[in-house]
Image (spheres, helix red, strand yellow):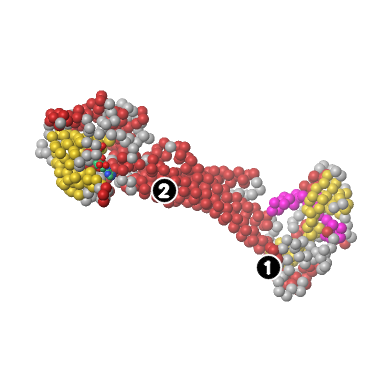
Amino acid sequence: MPQSTIVRLEGITKVYGMGDTTVHALAGIDLMIEQGEYCAIMGASGSGKSTMMNVIGCLDRPTDGQYYLDGQDVAQLSDRDLAHIRNQKLGFVFQQFHLLPQLSALENVMLPMVYASVPTAERKERAAEALIRVGLGQRLQNRPNQLSGGQQQRVAIARAIVNRPVLLLADEPTGALDSTTTREILAIFGELNESGMTVVMVTHESEVARCTNRVIWFKDGQVMQSYLAPEDLGTVTAA
Amino acid sequence: MDWVESGKMAVKTLTANKMRSSLTMLGMIIGNASVIAMVGIGQGAQRLASEQFESLGPNVLFISPGSNQARQRATNLPRTLIWDDAKAIASQVPAVQEVAAQKQGQYPIVYGGLNSSSSITGTTPSFLSVRSFDVAKGRFLTDLDLQRNQRVVVLGADLANRFFSDQDPIGKRIRIRNVSFQVIGVMRPKGSFLGSNQDDAAYIPLTTMSSTLTGRTSPYGLDVTFISVSAKNEASVPAAEFQITNLLRRRHKIVSQDDFTVQAQKDILQIVGTITGGLTAMLAAIAGVSLLVGGIGIMNIMLVSVTERTQEIGLRKAIGASGQDILVQFMIEAVLLSAAGGLIGTGVGVGGTLLVATFSPLKAAISPAAIALAVSVSGTIGLVFGVIPARQAAKLDPIVALRSA
Ligand SMILES: Nc1ncnc2c1ncn2[C@@H]1O[C@H](COP(=O)(O)OP(=O)(O)OP(=O)(O)O)[C@@H](O)[C@H]1O
Ligand SMILES: [Mg+2]
């Protein structure tokens, strides 16, 4: 299978504020992420990880630089087109789950398809499929407050993959979970990646990063090192 | 974005917070209910007044002392209208059928241990036919009674009933302002006119009224409170009005301003219509203000809701909602709130109007125009006052929205 490039960043910068208080959250990033990769992004707090996830996720525009998502130049797109790209090509998983409390698990997962104008009957079917895939086939009608943290994060993952995105982005998806639940969630990410999904995940824990097959290390808004093998991680964290 | 889904979502969001939603709707409910009830009651008052004047008959004209302007200013009416005027009209105006002169007063009436303060009308025999009254028992006043200043009285139905209950009042003597009068008749019940009970009344000869109760107070002759005239038919009303005016001007030697006013039923209806119409408009305007306040309440709550649901908005944008999708979502919520409030308020208003119609003489009526107006206005208010919060929601930056934990 010929590999295609999902993310290509060229000289991406993101500057916050102006005058004396400018912060270079991203200070010139060049990065490629190929189809089928499973990446972890690590780095100190404030090093720009979330900022970059937002740029990759088309939630934020870079101050400067080129960004090609799945071969398409997205830097110049309108807000409306970006919304469409987020809906069709990207899936997000957040640390705080961000489920809508008044909706059931099934309805939460159906939400992205509402904005994609998928026919109603198909929405239900696909949402149920996605929930079964993350192991929540028995909890379709439960509200978020009737689910554990791990279960809620699974609903969020199901919601992220239901529109079959080309890229799954997760910013500290296990940050709010205990170690057992973390392992379960990581197993799901692993399965998704094995079935061909490109996954990029921010994490602070090296055990989590070790499950991936590439670690991108951030410092002061720049990519310091991009390790291809998780075995190398031990030496870095020790250093 | 499909509308069915958006509608369902809005209903879900609104019902998730029932207390707040219903309190928000309360403004619209009160606004709508008051518009409909106020307009209904105002129009009821209008109809009641018109009907009562219409019941006088289309041929009737009233002549009262003082010019229109003078009567608006003066509390003490001029005593320029006299019985001789009435006699002159009866004999000299061809378009006129009959003429009744009336002198009104309010005096204590006593019979045995019972007493009452009732309206006393000194009048002439033609009063019955001109004003379409009827005698139930005994007889009415005659010309002879007037010529002889007889102390005789015809009682209104309620007054007779109060004093005599099942006894026969005919021939009994009652005291009006300490003067003894003999009861010669009882009127048939007539109902109330503009809020005053026409059956709680007593009728005595005009001449007796003047000589024994009021005393003569005008230098011109036997002054009267007003003169009722019936024209030959409806078509002759304008002619009668014109001829009476000319005659009185001549008799009163008017050079500039009239010291009397002639009004046909039509003129009175017009005046009543203007007054009650203005009243209705004023009531509606006041109620309209509460509708506006209701709209501002909706805007207020929607703004709070946008702030509270920042994360939801951020999340929706992250999974693909455009600014327009968010705008539509919040607009639908605002319009649903106000329209639902409008509908409930309409129900309350209609109920209130019907209640007033059943328990008061006001013939309060449900005005379809007022309902249409109130419901469409409340829908529009939802649209107008929903725009600001919805736009605020739509332009939220998804990152900022997501981060606000
Ligand atoms: N909206 C903003 N305005 C100003 N500065 C910002 C803004 N967002 C981020 N920053 C700054 O940009 C830098 C990078 O922030 P970012 O959130 O990307 O860090 P991070 O690597 O995700 O940190 P953490 O591990 O704590 O999540 C920080 O110095 C932060 O203060
Ligand atoms: Mg972060």
| Chain identity of mark 2 | B
The reply, left or right, for residue A170 in relation to residue B56 is left
> Badge 2 local density, few (<14 within 10 Å), some, or many (20+)?
many
Judge by depth and name the residue closer to the eye, A204 or A130.
A204
Residue segment shown in magenta = B184-213
Judge left or right: residue B47 versus residue A79. Answer: right
Label 1 belongs to which residue?
A: B238
- The residue at the point 73 percent across, 75 percent down is B255
Q: Quadrant of the C terminus of chain B?
A: top left
Residue type at mark 2 is Gly
Earlier residue among tags 2 and 1: 1
Q: Amino acid at mark 1?
A: Pro
Visible in this render: residue A74? no
**Subunit of mark 1?**
B
Residue sitting at the far left: A2
Q: Quadrant of residue B11?
A: top left
Kind of element beneath mark 1: helix
**How far apart are labels 2 and 1 at the CA level?**
57 Å
* Residue B386 disc label: 2
Residue beneath the point at 25% across and 27% down: A182
Residue B132, position as x, y percentages in the image: 74, 56
Residue A217 appears anywhere in the view: yes
Q: Secondary structure at mark 2?
A: helix
Quadrant where the N terminus of chain B is found in the figure: top left
Q: Is residue B98 magenta?
A: no
Badge 1: how crowded within 10 Å, few (<14), some, or many (20+)?
some
**Left or right of A114: which side holds B146?**
right
Q: Nearer the viewer, residue B393 or B282?
A: B393
Place residue A46 in its image quadrant: top left
Image position of B172 with respect to B218: above or below: above
Depth check, mark 2 against mark 1: the one in front is 2
